[in-house]
Image (spheres, helix red, strand yellow):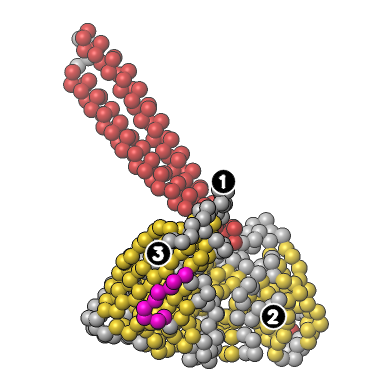
Amino acid sequence: MDAPIVTVTVYPQHARVTRRCQVTPADGSRVEITGLPLSLDAASVRVSGAGDALVTGVDVAYVQHAEPADPTLRALVEQRRADQATVDEVADDESAAAARVDLLTGVARRSGASFAKALAGGDAEPGRVQEVSEALSTQLAVALKERRALATRLERLREDLAALDRQIETRSAQSEQDSSTIVVELESPATAEIELSYVVPGARWEPGYDVRVRGTDVTVTSYGLVSQHTGEDWPECELTLSTARPANTVVIPELQPWYLDRQQPDRRSMVPPAPAAAMAYGGAPAGRDGFAAHVAEVEQGTTAVTFRPARPVAIPSGAQGHRTTLAQLDFTAELDYVTAPTQAEEAYLRAKVVNTGQHTLRAGRAAVFHEAEFVGSTLLELWAPSEERELALGVDDRIRVERELVKRSAGKATFSAQRRREADYQTTVTNHSPREAVVSVLDQVPVSRDDAITVRDLRVSPEPVERTELGQFTWRLAIAPGASATVSLGYRVDVAKGVELSGWRE
């Protein structure tokens, strides 16, 4: 019996598929729903319904097929057979045309020698020779043209057949040769409706986001990326996405501790390779300015959130990252700048945004747009209601940063054998934008990990708003349009006699 799919609920690691059909007393007491995925979880099968029918038993059987159980794959295989027959037919015609060309070429070669001998002996009329030669030339030209046309057609047919083979190979990797059948035993004195559901692996969804910042307004459009390789195509039906779980990235610069160590002779440290950077996903924006996006109905459960898209969605087997819009949220941001001139003399625009919505946003890739410009992609971490997040909006060239070494000295202490190194830096930030800029300046001094190496005589101006035990300092500057602000940092490093310093940099 045919039971169409009416609802699909996708979880982070699998999906629950619901089918529905009508049964009548004429159908008998045994109803079979065939052509289901072989990988369905038999323990998850549930049958319910409406009407006077009484379900007396449910069983799952597995069926072996001589041909693929997937109707789409079966149609592709049938199409390949027909296309292969066409290729074979054209190949035969091309071979026949080639044989005709060879025959005419041989006849022309032999007749040419015979005509030349006959003309020399006076046994042939020149007009007759010319007539026969022209006839042979015409037939040979027609045969050559036919062979070329057939060869061209055969090449294109073989290219189409290769493309079809790739489709079959891809579909075969997603489908199964055999299938499952759900057998329902029931007593149905009248027409009734049966609804059955089952869980299949090979399906998942993950969140993605478009983040648009316009001034202090932030619009976060969330969408679900659905992938499914269950072996069955999901037609246009009610799609639900649930967070329930049964059983070249733009970043804000951060300073790492700067350590000074005693240099160890004949000792080489093995530096492990840096982990590969995760590829960020940058989706296209959900809609252009002036167009509203269809958002999903959201239900917040005790521990999970359920999204129901506004429209039915069809997702074929093999779909990777099928996108459906879930929600559009409007927030207000606090904008400022961050610069770490020891890494790069650039100022990064940063937006601090508080989730004023009612639902937690799952971690996912986010494409960040500043006004109409695409800034880059980043990972949006789990974002709970009332929680603040920082969004990097790229470099603003109107905020100029310059870090300069204004003093450097090296020598020995006057009354000891210690060696000393001193350095003073000055960082100047200039605001060329038309409005006031709040800039956080990050800098650092080295941290000693050896008793024979001492960092002292710290000189800072102005007083930083934050300092850590790992030698990191933060200044927060409010700079008027066209104005500049300066931060100074200096220190001295004392090294005991006989100790070789490592880790020093300027």
Observer able to see residue 162: yes
Name the residue located 27 percent from the left edge and 76 percent from the top edge.
Answer: 430
Task: Tell me which numbered mark, 1 or 3, is placed earlier along the sequence.
Answer: 1
- Observer-nearest of 63 and 90: 63
Q: Mark 3 points at which residue?
A: 422
In the image, the segment drawn in magenta is 456-464
- Residue type at mark 1: give it: Asp
> Image quadrant of residue 422?
bottom left
- Counting from the top left corner in percent of width and height, residue 447 is at 51, 67
Please check the rendered image and state whether residue 461 is part of the magenta-colored stretch, yes or no: yes
Q: How far apart are marks 1 and 3 (CA)?
A: 28 Å
- Observer-nearest of 255 and 129: 255
- Observer-nearest of 441 and 218: 441
Please check the rendered image and state whether residue 434 is part of the magenta-colored stretch, yes or no: no
Name the residue located 56 percent from the left edge and 67 percent from the top edge.
Answer: 317
- Residue type at mark 3: give it: Glu
Q: In this view, does 340 lie above or below 214?
A: above
The dot on residue 196 is 2
Q: Is 4 on the left-hand or right-hand side of 122?
A: right
Q: Is 15 on the left-hand or right-hand side of 458?
A: right
